[in-house]
Image (cartoon, coloured by chain):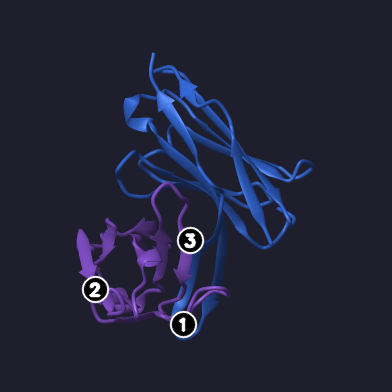
Chain colours: A purple, B blue
Amino acid sequence: SYELTQPLSVSVALGQTARITCGGNNIGSKNVHWYQQRPGQAPVLVIYRDSNRPSGIPERFSGSNSGNTATLTISRAQAGDEADYYCQVWDSSTSYVFGTGTKVTVL
Amino acid sequence: QVQLQESGPGLVKPSGTLSLTCAVSGGSINTSNWWSWVRQPPGKGLEWIGEIYHSGSTNYNPSLKSRVTISVDKSKNQFSLKLSSVTAADTAVYYCARVSWGYYHSSGYFRGFDYWGQGTLVTVSS
């Protein structure tokens, strides 16, 4: 089965940049989506197909994907960015796979 | 703006069947989207359960396939989940979600969840 590994937690100072990684075998060949889940709320799509932002998502959120690592970058971090973040991929053999999730804390 | 709303019992007895419905508003279920169920045990990560197309075609997580049935009711613009023989391990927040999918020559097929319901907690307990 295919696995996606994320760091358990990432801390970032207010106004600084946070980078959340998502590791998987040759993940660069797949399309990666990222979700933000604030406490007690449903996940929200923040990046789709590696680096695209849905309407309404701030430009501060960006994504990249190459080799064995996909990365979600949050620039100028705000208190409201505190949440759990999940990466996700799909392919015909493994179907939908979610990453282990990363808790982002804004200091 | 598409909206999804889960409904169903919040408490199910062990060995019973969990039944949930997802009502879709702001758009038709009869589109080129798949419709999915995803669950999240308390304090844990996300797990995909299965999906359905408006035609009735389904795909299920192999680890749950023997216990899961997903159906669609186009007349009511909703789809449903049944999970049988539940145990405490099935206690989770259950989300319904819309799947956006497609193919790009540069990066191949993709499927992701662009709209989610608010989720409903189902507890399995006697």
Q: Which element is circle 1 on?
A: loop
Q: Chain of mark 1?
A: A
B13 over A38 or under it: above or below? above
Q: Position of residue A59 (x, y in %)?
A: 46, 82
Could you confirm whether marks 2 and 3 are on the same chain? yes
Residue at position x 36%, y 71% in the image: A78
Amino acid at pointer 2: Ala
Q: Amino acid at mark 1?
A: Glu
Q: Is residue B45 left or right of residue B5?
A: left
Residue corresponding to mark 3: A44
- What whole-number distance in Å separates the C-alpha atoms at marks 2 and 3? 23 Å
Residue B33 vertical placement versus B52 (above, below): below
Q: Indicate the chain on which mark 2 is placed.
A: A
Above-or-below relation of A91 to B14: below
Dot 2: element = loop
Residue B87 against residue B4 in the figure, above or below: above
Residue at the (53%, 76%) spot, across then down = B103
Q: Which residue is at the front of the view, B17 or A12?
A: A12
- Image disc number at residue A13: 2
Q: Going from the N terminus, do you reach mark 2 or mark 1 first? A: 2
Type of amino acid under label 3 = Val
What number is the disc on residue A59? 1
Between disc 2 and disc 3, whose residue precedes? 2
